[in-house]
Amino acid sequence: MLTVKQRTSSGCENIIETRSVSYQPSSVIDGVRARTVYIRSEDGAMVPNRDGVFYVMNEAGNTIAKYDLGS
């Protein structure tokens, strides 16, 4: 299990527990190309996120990845 901390450009923070995280440096959603972090939801869907900074931590609490998507 992984823990993801998201800090949005507006200053909000979210803590999300997930089984997988995927980073795409150039994905297209609704005709817009941008960097995207996908986080697997409880129902198994990969949810796209395009705003903020993401810290991915393993079960030991160590940060194993950081993605800065900006605003």
Image (cartoon, rainbow, N blue to C red):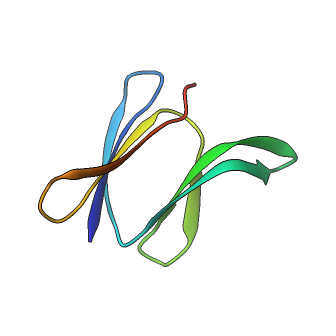
In the rendered view, tell whether residue 25 sits above or below residue 12: below
Specify the farthest residue to the front.
64
Rendered location of residue 45, percent (x, y): 56, 73
In the rendered view, tell whether residue 49 sits above or below residue 13: below
Residue at image location 36% in from the left, 73% down from the top: 19
Residue at image location 88% in from the left, 47% down from the top: 31
Left or right: where 58 falls relative to 34: left
Specify the farthest residue to the left.
60
Rendered location of residue 7, percent (x, y): 37, 33
On the image, which quarter does residue 55 sit in? top left
Residue at image location 23% in from the left, 62% down from the top: 58
Question: The N terminus lies in which quarter of the figure?
Answer: bottom left
Rendered location of residue 57, percent (x, y): 25, 54
Rendered location of residue 39, percent (x, y): 48, 60
Question: The C terminus lies in which quarter of the figure?
Answer: top right
Residue at image location 38% in from the left, 22% down from the top: 11
